[in-house]
Image (cartoon, rainbow, N blue to C red):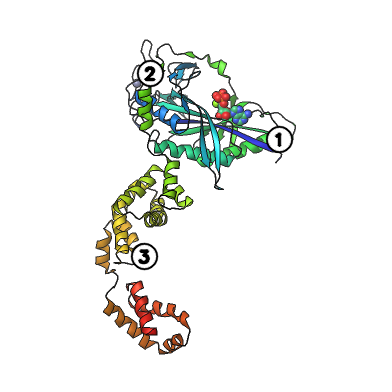
Amino acid sequence: MKYEVVIGLEIHAQLKTESKIFCGCSTRFGASPNAQTCPVCLGMPGVLPVVNKKAVEYAMKAGIATNCRIVRDNRFARKNYFYPDLPMGYQITQFELPIAVEGYLDVPLSDGSLKRVGITRIHMENDAGKSSHDPYRPVSFVDLNRAGTPLIEIVSEPDMRSAEEAGAFMRQMHTLLQFMNVCDGNMEEGSLRCDANVSLRLKGAKEFGTRTEMKNLNSFRNIERAIHSEIRRQADILDDGGVIVQETRLWNADEGKSVSMRSKEDAHDYRYFPDPDLLPIIIDDEFYNRVKDSLPELPEAKKDRYMKVMGLSAADAAVLTSSPEIAAYFENCLTLMNKPKTVANWIMGSVLALVNVKGLSIAQSPVPEKALTELLELVESAVISGTMAKTVFEAMAETGKPARVIVDEKGLAQVSDTSEIEGIVDKILADNPKEVGEYRGGKTKLMGFFVGQIMRASKGKANPALVNDILVKKLEG
Ligand code: ADP
Ligand code: MG
Ligand code: ZN
């Protein structure tokens, strides 16, 4: 392709506060329509909004974690437009003085490199309600439960150069917001959503091309698909000598294509002005430091620690820090059994496979931390072999019983009694005189054959290390 792709994302994240941003109504999802409303979020005349301090705190956390400068004197503004799900006739958002500006995020790409994407700004605003339209009658409904839910909008610089980079940026942001516990990250329910701005320019050109904005991207896959589709659409137009119209487009995931929604409005169309009902938000050092100090260890730092202190591979560390639940599961295991590599292998190999098949989060794993480490202790103390442990793990997942109980019930304990193993070894050697002769004649590869026979005779229960010792002694002694 002769064009270079330019992408900037606008990400909306619903903050996980219990109440709305300017009133005390609950933000819980799934209540009956309009049950969670009051005069403030219904936009009645004469009411006064009051800022939710938690929302400010969460927005600051997002700003600090994305290396932004926190604007110590930031303000709310009114963005005026009419829509049935916006009863006030304006959205309360931030315009000239947003809470955070000039940050960046280092995004890991699939080739192992890091891509730095600039964050232009993060601002706070309220969400709108939800309209629905009756397909059989000429009626529409408005549910204002969501009206007034706190959002942050994270605006990136136009720094991404492919759909994959945009997808990776969104994934990184998703992980980061969840680690900070400021957003639940549920893209299907719309708690995290993004608009993608896409333009093309001839390779080497200095000026950006005209951009379009794609809305309604509610999964990582759809972000990438929609961008790919938009790149093709724009390239076709440009190839034919056409011009790109600056517009907002709506992605239709079922049909795999977008349609034009409206020509792009400019900021001045909204008649922004400072909201006279809300005081400026002044963030003093004490508040700033308290929020900064309350940030948990972030995924990149965690990943580094897993690699440098625990000696895990980059790939393993990336999986273990891909969600706060997985990292918590891993670290909980380590408090019970401090063997990072063993625990990591089991999480990656067995636990994640199990929860993925069942469609559960690792926090709901049928084999929780304590159960897993109890199983691994049995391997460490040679009660069962590593191979046997896989069988026991499956039984634990199915029955919920502790490892020890399954081992006892099924009689799976490893035989570490020397005389018992010696008996089996003697029998196998006596049954296979020809192979014994060949071994002693130099065909040492037959070792594997003997071990196999012995393990089979013991139904997999003979302690492999002891089998080896005894076998070598008998064959060579
Ligand atoms: P608006 O709020 O009107 O959409 P902004 O200036 O805030 O406008 O930009 C929105 C997004 O568009 C930002 O993420 C920015 O990086 C991105 N963007 C701006 N210009 C371009 C362009 N030419 N191509 C692709 N993305 C762009
Ligand atoms: Mg926009
Ligand atoms: Zn309310």
Instruction: Reply above or below: 414 against 286.
Output: below
Residue wearing tag 2: 42
In the displayed structure image, the side of residue 316 where residue 391 appears, left or right: left
Q: Quadrant of residue 25?
A: top left
Q: Which residue corresponds to the image point at 71% horizontal and 35% vertical from the top-left? A: 204
Q: Ligand 2 falls in which quarter?
A: top right
Instruction: Reply above or below: 81 against 66.
Output: above
Q: Nearer the viewer, residue 134 or 401?
A: 401
> Mark 3: which secondary structure?
helix
**Residues marked 1 and 3 touching at CB (< 8 Å):** no
> Mark 1: which secondary structure?
loop
Residue wearing tag 1: 204
Residue wearing tag 3: 386
- Within 10 Å of disc 2 (Cα), the crowding (few <14, some 14-19, many 20+) is many
Specify the amino acid type for callout 3: Gly
Query: Could you tell which of marks 2 and 3 lies nearer the N-terminus?
Result: 2
Instruction: Reply above or below: 41 against 380.
Output: above
Specify the amino acid type for callout 1: Gly
Query: Could you tell which of marks 1 and 2 lies nearer the N-terminus?
Result: 2
Q: Nearer the viewer, residue 321 or 310?
A: 310
Q: Which residue corresponds to the image point at 28% horizontal and 73% vertical from the top-left? A: 416
Observer able to see residue 472: yes
